[in-house]
Amino acid sequence: MPAAQLLISLGLAAMAVPLHAQDGPPISPYRPSVSSPAQLPAPGQLEFELGGLSSKTDDDRRASLPYTFKLGFNEQWGVLIGGEGYVSARTDGDPRQRGIGDTTLELKRAFLIDDGTAFGLELGVKLPTAKDSIGSGRSDYVLNGIYSQDMGIVHMDANLNATRLGAYEAGSGRIQKGWSASFSAPVSEKWGVTTELSGTRRSGQTNTAQLLVAATYSPTKRLTIDWGVARGLTSASPDWSLFSGIVLPLAKLW
């Protein structure tokens, strides 16, 4: 099933759920930005995020279905499991490669200061579940620091992270530093907008940077759909990326 058709089907199915079944804590979307918020989902609420992503870099093309499962044990601790459920990629004119992507596991700690301010730490590992023609074939380890702040109606998430790469080019650094800052705001009761700058730095490699702009639609507090585009700002970044996704709760475990 194409990514767009899958997302539309999920959105229609979620919106068709009876109103009484939509009762419960609001969801905490981590999509559509690169930045993660410091806050966790409501304790015991298993949330699911699924998206479709298509990107172009020169003559290379890549399409995937990124997903994330999120679960907060309490307001301070939680876990995330994510990855790419399907990848279709073509590089340097070679035959198109298809298969599942790599898988990420993250432990998250939130430090809540007040209702609008929080810090966070994420410790994660990327497992090489993809075949070598799609993934790196090696495990990566990442430590991500987060600062989230409400500024009036605008919400900001800023991330700084370091990734120890399992696979890297000769003459380049093994540690990749990443940064991002996203700003989101409502434009009506159900619609919102997000904009973000993000990028990476690594010795021996050209820096990456991109600008992301997205719209979100939340027909209920327990369902959010997003659409957006990202534009590369350096020669090492993808020329452009198009994406769409959905966030909804799967179960209240406790």
Image (tube, rainbow, N blue to C red):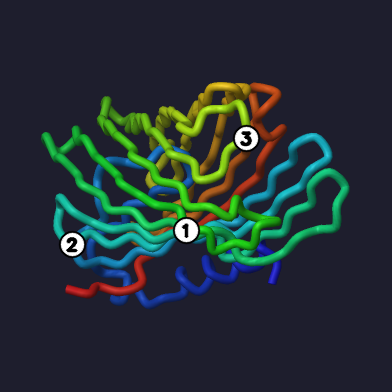
Amino acid type, residue under disc 1 in the picture = Leu
Q: Residue at x 69, y 72 (%)?
A: 1
The answer to whether the residues at label 3 and label 2 have Cβ atoms under 8 Å apart is no
Task: In this rendered view, identify the residue nearer to me: 101 or 47.
Answer: 101
> 119 above or below 225?
above
Q: Amino acid at mark 2?
A: Phe
Q: Nearer the viewer, mark 1 or mark 2?
A: 1
Q: Which residue is mark 3?
A: 169
Residue 51 image-quadrant placement: bottom right
Vertical placement of residue 100 versus 208, above or below: below
Q: Residue at x 54, y 63 (%)?
A: 129
> Which percent across, then down, holds residue 254?
16, 73
Question: Looking at the image, is mark 3 or mark 1 earlier in the sequence?
Answer: 1
- Image point (33%, 60%), residue name: 70
Q: Position of residue 136 (x, y in %)?
A: 60, 50
- Is there any visible trace of residue 93 in the rendered image? yes
Label 1: few (<14), some or many (≥20) within 10 Å? Answer: some
Q: Residues within 10 Å of mark 3 (few under 14, many from 20)?
A: few
In the rendering, which numbered label is found on residue 127? 1
Q: Secondary structure at mark 2?
A: loop
